[in-house]
Image: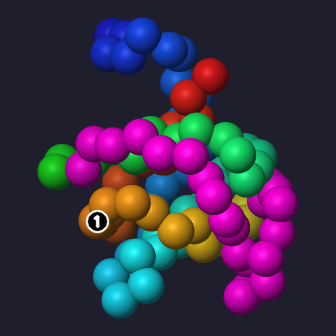
C-alpha cells in the first residue's frame, strides 16, 4: 500500500449509512474513535478530511466509540456506503 498522505493513516472502519438531510454518516468501527480525532473518508468518489466535532450512538451524544460500535458522525461532505474511514495520525 502506497502512502498518499504526508501523515500516516489507520483504517478504523467504514460507512454503513448516510443521512443527507442531516449530513450525518454511520461508521461501523473496528477500533476506537474519539471526538476531536481527525478522520479521512475515502471511496470511489469520496475523498476528504475533517475533525470529528460530535458523535452519537443510539441517538445519545458520546465522546468516544469503540470496536463494533455503530457511531453517527456529522460529516462535511457527502459519503457513500462502503467508503473507508481512516484516522489521521
Q: Which residue is mark 1?
A: 78
Q: Quadrant of residue 17?
A: bottom left
Residue 53 located left or right of residue 44: right
Residue 73 located left or right of residue 43: right
23 falls in the magenta region: no
- Residues 20 and 42: in front is 20
What residue is shown at x 83% (from left), y 60% (from top)?
63
Vertical comparison of 70 with 34: above or below: below
Q: Position of residue 84 (x, y in %)?
A: 42, 47
47 falls in the magenta region: yes
Taking the view exactly as shown, the residue that stands out farthest to the left is 45
Residue 41 located left or right of residue 70: left
**How are the residues colored?**
rainbow
Mark 1 falls on what kind of element? loop
- Residues 79 and 81: in front is 79
Q: Position of residue 76 (x, y in %)?
A: 39, 60
Q: Quadrant of residue 42?
A: top left
What residue is shown at x 28% (from left), y 42% (from top)?
47
What residue is shown at x 56% (from left), y 29% (from top)?
88
Magenta extent: 46-67
Q: Would you say residue 82 is visible in this rendering?
A: no
Q: Position of residue 74 (x, y in %)?
A: 52, 68
Amino acid at each position: 500500500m502506497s502512502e498518499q498522505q504526508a501523515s500516516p493513516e489507520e483504517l478504523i472502519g467504514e460507512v454503513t449509512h448516510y443521512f443527507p438531510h442531516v449530513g450525518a454518516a454511520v461508521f461501523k468501527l473496528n477500533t476506537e474513535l474519539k471526538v476531536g480525532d481527525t478522520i479521512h473518508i475515502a471511496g470511489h468518489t469520496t475523498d476528504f478530511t475533517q475533525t470529528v466535532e460530535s458523535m452519537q450512538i443510539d441517538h445519545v451524544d458520546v465522546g468516544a466509540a469503540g470496536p463494533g460500535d455503530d457511531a453517527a458522525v456529522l460529516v462535511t461532505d457527502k459519503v457513500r456506503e462502503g467508503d473507508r474511514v481512516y484516522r489521521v495520525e
